[in-house]
Amino acid sequence: MKTFYRSSVILLLIVIAVFSCEKKKKQTFDNLFKKHIISEQQGIDMFHEFHNSRTNLIEPILQNHYNDSTFQDTKFVWVSLDDMKTYIHFVETIQKENPTKDVSGLRLYFAAYPNSNEFNGKRIKHPRQQTFFMIPTVKNKRSTEKNVNLNHLPFVIESKGDNVLKGSFKIVEELMLDYDKKLRLDTYNKTDINLESSFGARSLLAQESNKTTISTIFNEGEMSPPPNN
């Protein structure tokens, strides 16, 4: 009887746990649909709007700029689910290794490859084509409620030692908008110094002369239409 009772309790706890997880997932998806999922038709309309208001205007200019009448700019970039999951895990690991920081999200940037076959010795698969890249952000804790998205600053890691994902966060100023740029940098740096000094890490890092910069920027998807070359 006791064994049956214990088994029943365990089974009940498992059922509660499963339903709790399912409820949590449902709430997450509800929020996703409410805030971010758009309709099929809206996606189609937005794609056509981009093509009509930008591609049709810019592509002839690019063809003239590159002296290539056949040039077609990128229409979409494909990234595998496995690569995306790995990148998200990479960003989450950075947060875990730097608990005093607040890794708050991702910035997605429109970008373009140079008109060259390589960059810093690395082959460029899609010269001249537009693309995008992602970089994680750290929250500026002293920021105001105005222009909230600007309060999340893009960063790379300055690290030394075996754990390359642990170190100080270097804000990439060149990827920030000029609007209140100095103020946002100053408020972040003041907060960062106070946080690090309370853990004794800032003074230690300041003495390091061989810090390595670890990039956090994600790029290199599969692009279409394919480049002619």
Image (spheres, helix red, strand yellow):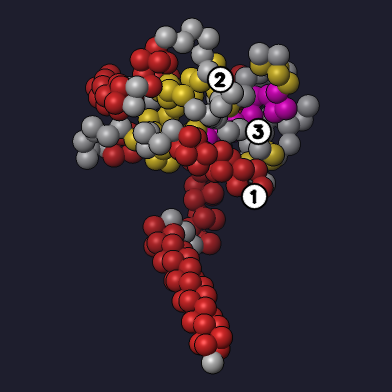
Please check the rendered image and state whether residue 128 is part of the magenta-colored stretch, yes or no.
yes
Q: Residues within 10 Å of mark 3 (few under 14, many from 20)?
A: some
Q: Does residue 212 sit above or below 146 in this rendering? A: above
Q: 17 and 31: which one is in front?
A: 17
Q: Does residue 109 sit above or below 13 in this rendering? A: above
For badge 3, the amino acid type reads: Glu
For badge 2, the amino acid type reads: Gly
Where in the figure is residue 140, as x and y percent of width and height? 30, 32
Residue 219 visible, this orientation: yes
Q: Which residue is at the far right? A: 229
Identify the secondary structure beneath mark 1.
Answer: helix
Q: Which residue is at the far top? A: 209
Question: Label 2, on which residue?
Answer: 161
Question: Label 1, on which residue?
Answer: 81
Give the mark, 1 or 3, whose residue is nearer the N terminus: 1
What residue is drawn where x is 47% and y is 39%?
A: 96
Provide the residue span drawn in magenta. Answer: 124-134
Identify the secondary structure beneath mark 3.
Answer: loop
Q: Nearer the viewer, mark 3 or mark 2?
A: 2
